[in-house]
Amino acid sequence: MNLIIKPAETFRGDYTYTNSDEAILRFPFPFPEDIYMYAVNVEPHVRGGPTSAYDAVFDIDEHYVGDMEDRAITLAEDPLRCQVLPHMNEAEWDTLELLMESLSYDYPEHFTLTKNGDEWHWVNRPLNIDQHFTFGRRETLPYGPFEYITRQVQGDFSVQDQRDGTLYMDGGMVTSQADWSLNFDVGMTFHEWHGPVPLAHEAGVFDRALQYLLRLQHGKPVRRLNWTITANPRLDTSPENYPIWGPEKAEINPANVAHRMCLRVEVQTLTRLPRSNAILFGIRGYLIRLQELARVKKWAIRMHRVIRDLHPQIAEYKGMPRYRQFIIDYLASYDDGSHLNSGTAPEQDAL
Amino acid sequence: MKLILAKIKVLSPSIRHFTLAPVSGTLPVAGAGAHVVLEIAGPGRVWKNAYSIISAPGAATYEIVVRRVEMSRGGSAWLHDHAQIGKVIEVQPPQNLFTPPRTARKHLLLSAGIGITPFLSYLHVPGLNYEWHHCGKAEDAAAFKALLPDAAHVTLHTGRNALNLAALLAAQKLDTHLSLCGPEAFMDFALATAEHAGWPAQKIHKESFGGATGGEPFTVHLRRSGHTINVGADQSLLDALEAAGLAPPCLCRGGACGECKLPVLAGVPAHHDHYLSATERAANDAIMICVSRAQTQELVLDF
Amino acid sequence: MGNKSRPIYAPFKLDVTGRAHLIVTNLAEPPLELAEGFDDITVWTVKTIGRGIPAPAAPGLRPFRAVAELLPQLAVRLAQATVGLRLYAIGSEAFIWDAFNVAITAGLDKAEIFVHHAGPLVRRVYCTHCRTMIEDVAADITPCPACGAHLFVRDHFSRRLAAFMGVIVDAEVPGEVPAAEALTS
């Protein structure tokens, strides 16, 4: 992989975030069909997929540095965005080991991990980090091991303890969430933290997903996609700061919808951790402005149909009513009624 | 993966300690409570035996302790009677069905016989606060002594009724969890004693095996494509179809997503999925081919 | 549905698998008939006869002057107890989950704790923005006395915080606050 990381862009204020042509073509578009409904859309997380966003176990892209700077800003304002309950100590080290090994394997030009027994040396070139530490000893790192490494990997993370036949969200690093609060949800069971999601409980989606995850095996991670719509390429769409980003939603109008509205896709990965037997839940978010997405013909047409025909309760839950019609009107001009193939690949090599 | 038998230590006439090293590379990390499955080839069949890994997570080798099952002509007999240093053994990667309950502030460990092994792996958990009572036959005392830590909170009981279990269980504070491992009769006795003392099931932990993929072999006829395919004991129906060059629909491969559902035209499925409702299961007219098998020798599917 | 985060309360009943039973309530009397045939039952209530004097104790009954006195004592009691004890908390939703959390901290499992809501339908609401806890909220929209935000009370309950989630209702268009509706369930 030949990854060129951009200088830091902003995800708040002046929102300088944009996608290069390469980044657009590798976007993990979430709709394989013209209609969307909740499902247990989970599959093995193996290298390779419809775009290169699936080539690494934990994907690093051109936005890496800006993404990590935005996380640091959010954590400075609100340290409770990262919390791990005390009994998750081994899961913290599991997470650090998994992420360091994955990044150094997939991106050797940017990350290097050297081990000499428990004496480890970690080099992160894009962020200018050079750290010697002792694996298993928290006092040898500037933060707890979970916080230390998740400050250096794109995407939100939670660690889930398995007991009493369910999963507990007993820790997380959550700075780019789609309107849920770690401080409110930490310690909840699988069904509790999914409590507010409409329709899916009744369909039995969470019961089946939980049974599947409880049997998740070491060495066989899985993934699924989720998505929402965000006004501006903002990472911190937390309930805590809704008073700050809420007004930006009201500013969307037909003239600026193409530039400001973003499709936000989460590639969610679930990995069984070996020491703790906990599950690491990675929520890797990708943002694309509608005008960027519309440069891929198939995606513009499909997105038009999905949003137009979306179940009203899902549209409501995803915060869309205020501007759903603007999105439909903008994308309608791309929809020539043609038949689209199943699947999410862009089906074009260049823009 | 292939592991090489690197060391054998005789602990007693019936208990041996084996060290398994990777043929190349490093081993997957195995945490407290994890086990490996050894595939031991015998005449005409393969034994698949699960053994707790007692070495530390991240260690260069896996260590296991094996008791020779009396009258056994299977895996444990082979390991005791025929295994030699340098022998290469096929080993399935570690899985964990007996992880210590990490919210417990104190762990009361209760084991008997070869049930000692999973708790040896618990000792690697940093800062584990525990009290361990192990029961064994007098003739194995030396072997167990060699394995158990020499500490005040670890007790080896070798006589009959040497341990007053009722008193021990009644005296535990509310922040204690009980973990059990041993022969069935021992487990039943301990569970009954704990229940009588008012222990809730949620604070009693024992190894639970589940979600096995294999089963009895059977034959599947595919009505539409005209194929007849034998499903072996060690493969899933989905694996067998794929091995025959077919590409049935599938996604999660774990019985959750519903993608691989196929109509059953004849025969009775053995449902192992989490997707079909109780009514759908009872109808026996559909099967999730990634995990489910057959109760009858043959199945006919509409595919 | 039993699936969501909002608790569903079963009718009160002593757990026959327990060896000892401790019932705590923030009411003056527990609103229930205690079952016959259980040997070891203790009841803690909140009841004073004024001027800082608790109501008189009786065998198996211990009145506290306030919840603030009861809860720390509960922690002490549970730290001394042995396995076999069952805890029952009866009263306002905020109280029963506060007691629940004292018990979890003491090492009890969820299976050893039974909570039963009694009294008016009011909620404790957590202001997601400034983290203030607002007690006795009886409507689906409430102002936060600390930061001034008008909060919509989401149907999402945290047992750890013993509170429902309150999120600003008029963030997108300040001042666009719908009329509050009284809680009905």
Image: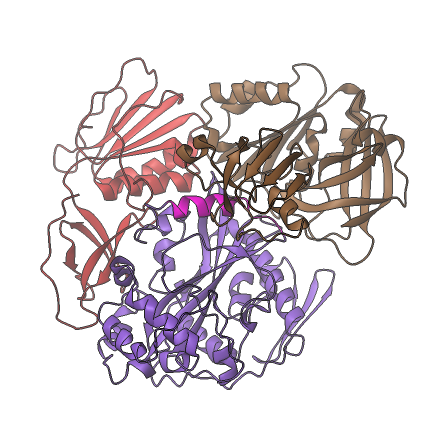
* Residue pictured at 18% horizontal, 27% vertical: C31
Relative to B126, C133 lies left or right: left
Q: Is residue A77 visible?
A: no
Colouring method of the image: by chain
Which of the two residues, B204 or C24, is positioned nearer the viewer here? Answer: B204
Which corner quadrant of the image does residue B214 belong to? top right
Q: Nearer the viewer, residue A87 or B192?
A: B192
Q: Position of residue B262 (x, y in %)?
A: 50, 43
Residue at horizontal 18 percent and vertical 68 percent from the top: C170
Instruction: Tell whether position A213 is magenta.
Output: yes
* Residue at image location 38% in from the left, 76% down from the top: A300
Q: Which chain comes out red in the rendered image?
A: C
Q: Position of residue C118 (x, y in %)?
A: 19, 35
Q: Is residue C149 above or below residue C98?
A: below
Q: Is residue A44 above or below residue B168?
A: below
Q: Is residue B107 shown left or right of residue B86?
A: left
Q: Is residue A190 above or below residue C119?
A: below
**Drawing shade for chain B:** brown
Q: Residue C162, how many percent across, how many down? A: 29, 47
Between C54 and A78, the residue placed more toward the observer is: A78
Q: Residue furthest left?
A: C179
Q: Which residues are magenta?
A: A204-218
Instruction: Indicate whether B197 appears above or below A27.
Output: above
The answer to whether residue A279 shows anywhere in this view is: yes
- Magenta: predominant secondary structure element? helix
Q: Let me know if residue A68 is in the magenta part.
A: no
Q: How many marks?
A: 0
The purple-tinted chain is A
Q: Position of residue C15 (x, y in %)?
A: 35, 23
Q: Is residue B6 left or right of residue A248?
A: right
